[in-house]
Amino acid sequence: MKVTDIIFALISGRIIGFLLGDFLREWGIDIGLYWGLLIWIIFPLFSLFCLWVAHGIGKKILFIFQGAKFFLVGAVATIVDLKIFELLAWLFAVTIPFSSIVAKSISFIISTFLKYWGNKNWAFKEHQSLSEFQFDLAQEDDKNIREEVIQFFLITLIGLFIDVVAFYGFVNILGPQFGANEAIWLKLSVILAALTAAIWNFCGYKFLVFKK
């Protein structure tokens, strides 16, 4: 594993811990200082441990390590997706019809650009020496770049459709589950919709956009 792998794993684990703490507070559970510190420490270390295990397995099955990094990139983007959605939904609540759908579409697009950068430069990036990387850059022409961008946007647009449809289904068709109130279920729906679209995105990015 590289230093960048370790740093990204720790940051992603902290973000996942933040989401957990946020949900517990929404449920009215006071985690207190002690458990708050444990979340700060345990989740980054657990994230790093999982990536280390995936790295070991990935020596024989490459997509396992790529999938683990893809998940961590998605975790970082999901918190951005969720918080931007909450902000826009609050801003658009009165002035824009179907405000939640509009806010979700915008937050998804922004978070997808973050995922694109993370997947391109980390999750699906081959481990190369500096000389090999410079040689590849010299060989990469404008046509290849255009094709990658077009493929990325096509995959993203389909992912957007899947994400929004799944979000609508979770909120308006399925409705709150597991005793969650509407506010908590709305947040869970954002995450569940993102996970649903992530399955499509991983396959599209791996086998079409970033294939080597």
Image (cartoon, rainbow, N blue to C red):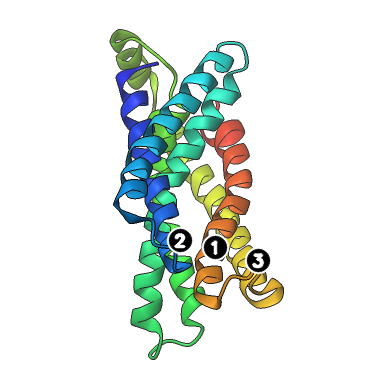
* Observer-nearest of 10 and 85: 10
Q: Residues within 10 Å of mark 2 (few under 14, many from 20)?
A: some
**Mark 1 or mark 3, which is nearer to you?**
3
Q: Looking at the image, tell me whether mark 3 or mark 2 is earlier in sequence order.
A: 2
Tell me the kind of residue under disc 2. Answer: Phe
Query: Residue at left 60%, top 55%?
Result: 158
Q: Is disc 3 placed on a helix, strand or loop? A: loop
Amino acid type shown at disc 1: Leu
| Quarter of the view holding residue 138 | top left
Tell me which amino acid carries mark 3. Answer: Phe
> Are the residues flagged by discs 1 and 2 in contact, CB closer than 8 Å?
yes
Q: Which residue bears the numbered disc 2?
A: 23
Which residue in the structure is indicated by mark 3? 178
The reply to whether callout 3 and callout 2 are in contact (CB within 8 Å) is no
Q: Indicate which disc, 1 or 2, sits on the residue closer to the N terminus.
A: 2
Residue 5 to residue 114: above or below? above
The image shows residue 179 at horizontal and vertical percentages of 63, 70
As helix, strand or loop, the secondary structure at mark 1 comes to: helix
Q: Which residue is mark 1?
A: 188
Q: Position of residue 38 (x, y in %)?
A: 36, 41
